[in-house]
Image (cartoon, rainbow, N blue to C red):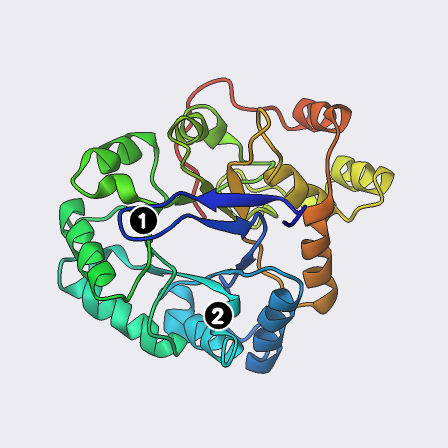
Amino acid sequence: MSNRPEVTLAATSRAPAVTLPAIGQGTWYMGEGHDTHQEEVTALQAGLDHGLSLIDTAEMYAEGQAERIVGDALKNRRDEAFLTSKVYPWNAGRDSAIQACENSLRRLGTDYLDLYLLHWPGGIALDETLEAFERLQQDGKIRRFGVSNFDVEEMRSLVEMPGGNDCATNQVLYHLGSRGIEYSLLPWHRKQELPVMAYCPLAQGGRLRRDLLDHPDIMATAAELDLTPAQLLLAWSIRPIDGQRHVMAIPKAVDPQHIQENAAALNVVLDDDTLANLNSIFPPPVAREPLDTA
């Protein structure tokens, strides 16, 4: 058994429970020319080598190019990855979601996704999307489904719909500088034993975005703990709450050193004094806030 922090996606009517490392790999901004195709492929493969088996992508990212990069990274290694992609809301109809998923599978070079998410709430009725997800599961094209950018009311409505209780996760923006989900959404998830997947855990997005990697208090605290600022932020994002881990983080990295540091953050345990100090600098919410998005 691994001693590294893990988060479990519960069993559903169509898929067994699965345990994942609490830190995975994001692909937002891949395929946009910031790095070469091969550099991004190599980065994802290095992440797999370090045990970061969860890979998250979306049809939106570089309009499918990120999925192609992931597909190249997973050639002959598909069984090493837990692969997640996301569907545009306007592609999430009872028939259009089937086509969108098949397009993603083709770009990814695989015949199934471990997890398929609705990227954000849209104008198509959610029961249509759930019907499409059910068909995709029946056909073996997806193992599980979930959502992204859903606030607490939307989650409550989802799980009350037929089949909605099989939702595996909700992917939302969450980092030390944007803690709004801690007021109502995260407590609801904890009560439901439904994990959260945190995007932008290194504070790369959101209306409350802060340059945390260069923040003097973050830099000082990280130095005291012999960590990089990124490792401190990642360790904070996946910290246990009341003894249980509820959050998985999916940072994007291409630099080999950053990938190694992200993986090493799985071994970081922040003590109570450090957490209290971070709370004093970046206080948790004291009232409901609108859901933050990138």
Disc ID at residue 120: 1
Furthest toward the front, the residue is: 1
> Which one is nearer the viewer's eye here, 21 or 250?
21
| SS for dot 2 | helix
| Tag 1–tag 2 contact (CB < 8 Å) | no
**Chain-order first, disc 1 or disc 2:** 2
The answer to whether any part of residue 217 appears in the image is: yes
> Which one is nearer the viewer's eye here, 17 or 125?
17
Residue 81 position in % (x across, y down): 50, 65
What amino acid is at disc 2? Asp
What amino acid is at disc 1? Trp
Residue 147 position in % (x across, y down): 33, 47
Task: Give residue 38's quadrant in the image.
Answer: bottom right
> Which one is nearer the viewer's eye here, 59 or 163?
163
Reply above or below: 91 against 162.
below
| SS for dot 1 | loop
Reply above or below: 114 against 166.
below
State the residue position of label 2: 79
Q: Calculate the distance from the C-alpha at mark 1 to the C-alpha at mark 2.
A: 28 Å
* Relative to 267, 76 lies left or right: left
Task: Give residue 288's quadrant in the image.
Answer: top left
Q: Which one is closest to the eye, mark 1 or mark 2? A: 2
> Which one is nearer the viewer's eye here, 18 or 223?
18
Identity of the residue drawn at 40% across and 37% down: 194
The answer to whether any part of residue 230 appears in the image is: no
Identity of the residue drawn at 68% across and 46% down: 3
* Relative to 31, 58 lies left or right: left
Furthest toward the top, the residue is: 286
* Relative to 157, 70 lies left or right: right
Residue 280 position in % (x across, y down): 69, 22
Circle 1 crowding by C-alpha within 10 Å: few under 14, some 14–19, many from 20: some
Identity of the residue drawn at 49% across and 76% down: 69
